[in-house]
Image (cartoon, rainbow, N blue to C red):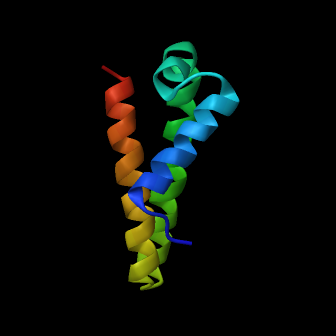
Amino acid sequence: MSLSPEERDKRLHSLDETIGQNLDQQIKEHKASAKVALALHFNRELVAAEECAKKRDLQEAFVHRIWAEMLNTTLKVLEK
């Protein structure tokens, strides 16, 4: 299912309303546990990318690589 950028933003906003706070507030309250969880997820994605590359499934390796890159970027922001 492909959503427009506006629809994606709307869904995220709806989730914020359900949770009762926005992402910035959540990060402030749960920064340490978020870093641990994101680091674990980064490692899983990178391992998956490496396994796919070994099997020459380059399309799937690419997708896992993108996820790993996004997680790495987020971790860098949290580590500041």
Quadrant occupied by the C terminus: top left
Image point 37% across, 60% down: which residue? 66
Quadrant occupied by the N terminus: bottom right
The answer to which of 53 and 33 lies nearer the viewer is 33
Q: Position of residue 18 (x, y in %)?
A: 69, 32
Q: Position of residue 62 (x, y in %)?
A: 37, 71
Q: Please say if 30 is above or below 23.
A: above
Image point 41% across, 76% down: which residue? 53
Q: Position of residue 7 (x, y in %)?
A: 49, 55
Which residue is most to the bottom? 56
Which residue is most to the top? 29
Q: Please say if 51 is above or below 9.
A: below
Relative horizontal placement of residue 74, taking residue 21 as reference (left or right): left
Q: Position of residue 77 (x, y in %)?
A: 33, 28
Image point 48% across, 53% down: which residue? 8
Q: Total number of numbered labels?
A: 0
Relative horizontal placement of residue 2, taking residue 69 as reference (left or right): right
Which residue is most to the right? 18
Q: Quadrant of residue 46?
A: bottom left
The answer to which of 31 and 18 lies nearer the viewer is 18
Q: Please say if 7 is above or below 56.
A: above
The answer to which of 31 and 21 lies nearer the viewer is 21
Q: Quadrant of residue 59?
A: bottom left
Q: Please say if 37 is above or below 44.
A: above
The answer to which of 11 and 64 lies nearer the viewer is 11
Relative horizontal placement of residue 12, taking residue 73 as reference (left or right): right
